[in-house]
Amino acid sequence: MQKLKRFLLSRNTVISLICAVGISCLVGSTIPQITTKSPQFFETWKASSPRLYYLIDFLQLNQVYTSAWFLILIAIIALSLAYSVYYQLKGLTKSKGPAQREITERAFKDFFTLTLVQGSRIRGQRSEVRVEELALRIKSIFRARGYRLYLAAEESRYFLFGKNRAGRWGSAIFHLGLLICILAALYGLAFQKRGFIQLKQADTFQGKNEDWPAKSLGAFAGNFDLGFQVYLNKFTPSYWENDQIRNLESSLTITDSKGEAWKFLLSPAGPIRFQGIKVYQSTHYGYAIGFILKKEGSEEILTDFLLDAQRKKDKPLEGKMDFPTTDYILNMKFYPNLIEPSFYATLPGVDLAVTEKEKQRFKGRVLFSQRARLNNNDSLKFVRIYYWTGLTFVKNCGMPLVYCGFALSTLGAFLIFMLPYKQVYLKVTEEGNNVQISMGGRSNRYKALFSEEFKELAEDLEKELGKHGNDSVT
């Protein structure tokens, strides 16, 4: 048990854990995550680099924040922090014995000594120094400076004064808040549910667990059923003159299990919240172009192909996909406007190459509503164009705990930086006919400012005690 304690509380362990979290976050931001990219992206990646994809998928680097190893890492951090908080609180709440310390110049950076010589004469009368009177005067001086007496031992010969005593709890409260945040994150990671969909304009997502094309579930999360439907009324992208995205806006209609409908506008500026689930606007979007395949002796087949939006308006949207239930493979270059570069489908056309079992069946340009003959009795007709957009759904657990932990951490930080705890130890000793006052002080923050305050206290002692018929020697 002691070995575990030393390991969890050692500086090297803490630094290593912080570095591990930093590296994990870096991995999560550099390697595409399965709930932030379209399934086609990962299929293409898998086909082009199967070994690399297998390694990343095996190590769960494409779902860092819900992976088992990240969960274990956060659990170790929580355990280390729990040990730290426990021993801090134990030190603060232990029984208050006479916490006397040796007051020497070696023990304290801020140190002061004052010798009061008895027997000096004021107005012809001999003055004696009494320890009891000195104690009252010393308390008065410290009280005027905002210090409070917390310990008086050895018949008022040993004193401990403190200022901003609440600041002693700052570090413990701060770390307790962090611990609560981490425990909430641990709980959230274990039960978090994230799903990504590509929704076409005028299409509905039913919200069933089996309908997700890509989802990431915590280690102990169950099925991800939304309990409501999402309909995309309209998707509107806008651009700056330099071809950068200006805004993306989705008009959504959400229908709950009772049939009641609500309309929302969603953009990257912030998510919408519905029944405890957050919906985020993805920056992945594009055009869905629809073809009807007419085969001899069978019914027509309508299929939409989702193409990622181009980054420059003078570039086409490209994609290579197979036509479902057939051996046809379509290689497409879609131009929103065939006359001039544009992001908007005002005069659309597609350069299409169709192969079947490695034999080319068609190659050429197909305009909207035109039909392409496939060198046999089959044909493809370009029939519709829609926008599609990515939407990410997230169900987080433990958010109230996160807010509570954040509030505690903020309070702890306030106590640490705004109310630093200051201690002054003072001892009165009698040496023959003289009385010596030894004083040492310390502060856990802003040591230079405390040194100035300590000097002012020393000056007050020398000045005030010297008024009462005593010769002082510092």
Image: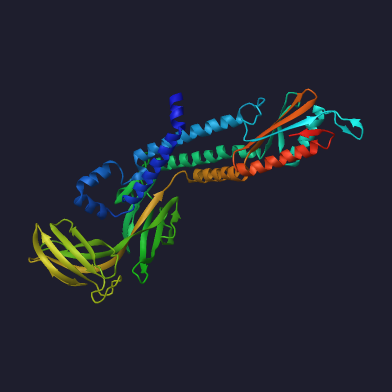
Q: Which residue appears at 14% of the width and 65% of the height? A: 353
Quadrant containing the C terminus is top right
Residue 376 or 157: which is nearer the viewer?
157
Q: Position of residue 122 (x, y in %)?
A: 89, 34
Q: Is residue 24 visible?
A: yes
Q: In x, y percent, where is residue 212?
A: 31, 51
Residue 205 appears in which quarter of the rendering? Answer: bottom left
Camera sees residue 191: no
- Which of the two residues, 135 or 81, is positioned nearer the viewer here? 135
Q: Nearer the viewer, residue 35 or 454?
A: 454
The N terminus - image quarter: top left
Residue under the image location 31 percent in, 47 percent down: 62
Q: Residue furthest right?
A: 124
> With 12 as the anchor, is 101 left or right in this view?
right
- With 52 as the anchor, is 105 left or right in this view? right
Q: What is the basis of the colouring in this image? A: rainbow
Where, by quadrant of the figure, is residue 457 drawn?
top right
**x, y percent for residue 335:** 24, 70
**On the picture, is 266 further left or further right than 406?**
left
Q: Is residue 255 left or right of residue 62?
A: right
Residue 449 pos. (x, y %): 64, 44
Q: Residue furthest bottom?
A: 339
Q: Give the answer, above or below, for where 195 lies relative to 142.
A: below
Task: Please tell me which residue is depicted at 23% across the width and 61% down the height of the picture.
Answer: 305
Vertical placement of residue 83 versus 44, above or below: above
Q: Residue at left 56%, top 37%?
A: 172
How many marks the image carries: the answer is: 0
Query: From the viewer's perspective, is residue 411 above or below residue 101?
Result: below
Q: Quadrant of residue 91?
A: top right
